Amino acid sequence: MENKTTSIGLRKALFADVNPAGGMPAVMRQLARTMKGTASFTTEADTTSDFYCEEEPAAPVESAPNEPGLKQVKLNFLEWDNDTLKEVFGGTVSEVEDVTVEGKSYSVTKYQAPRDIVTVRKAVRVITPHNVVIDIPNAQVTARFVWNLTRTDIAQIEVTAKALAPIGENDGPYAVYKLGEPKPGA
């Protein structure tokens, strides 16, 4: 019997700009660490239309698929910097500027949210502790703060990467594979 793959957990979530030629980018980076228990990869079933006939109404005569199900990675960052905010929300990072808060002056760089709705697209790679990899070469990334201003909750950024139509001729919306041993000299 062939070895079956099992996997648990998250080792890393990596992000990069979408490769315009298709496929996964050669260089990707981790934007932040992930809050324990928040990472998931979900594929929803495709929707279908069932067609019945009057003579045999108990079961469909035909069932035709009409919409593919959603495929997405979802996780919550538990830390960030201005560059991470810019990567997942869009927007800009300011030059160093002075601000006054409660009568004290500070030199800061600010993340400034975009004025308009922006679409953020990224390539996303998730690697598990069992070396199973999920690649999404073209994902629409949406993010939102989950920031309960209490002393018992840590501020988080919920990031959702929805698989979009692939760009490359040999790409699918996502790929799943298990890493073996690295090639010699790699």
Image (tube, rainbow, N blue to C red):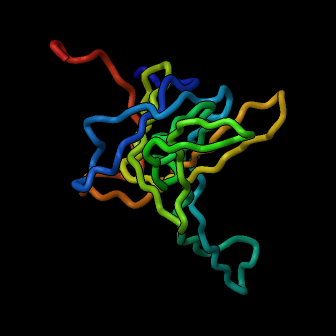
Where's the N terminus, which quadrant? top left
The percent position of residue 178, horizontal first and vertical second, equals 39, 27
Instruction: Specify the farthest residue to the top.
Output: 184
Foreground pick, 44 / 157: 157
Foreground pick, 116 / 72: 116
Residue 32 seen by the camera: yes
The percent position of residue 7, horizontal first and vertical second, equals 53, 24
Foreground pick, 12 / 144: 144
Kindly indicate the quadrant of the structure image that contains residue 28: top left
Rendered position, 86 above or below 26 = below
**What residue lies at 60% left-to-right and 38% top-to-bottom?**
75
**What residue lies at 25% left-to-right and 37% top-to-bottom?**
26
Total marks in image = 0
Where's the C terminus, which quadrant? top left
**What residue lies at 56% left-to-right and 61% top-to-bottom?**
46
The percent position of residue 90, horizontal first and vertical second, equals 48, 54
Instruction: Specify the farthest residue to the left.
Output: 185
**What residue lies at 15% left-to-right and 13% top-to-bottom?**
185
55 relative position to 165: left or right: right
Rendered position, 71 above or below 74 = below
Rendered position, 120 above or below 26 = below
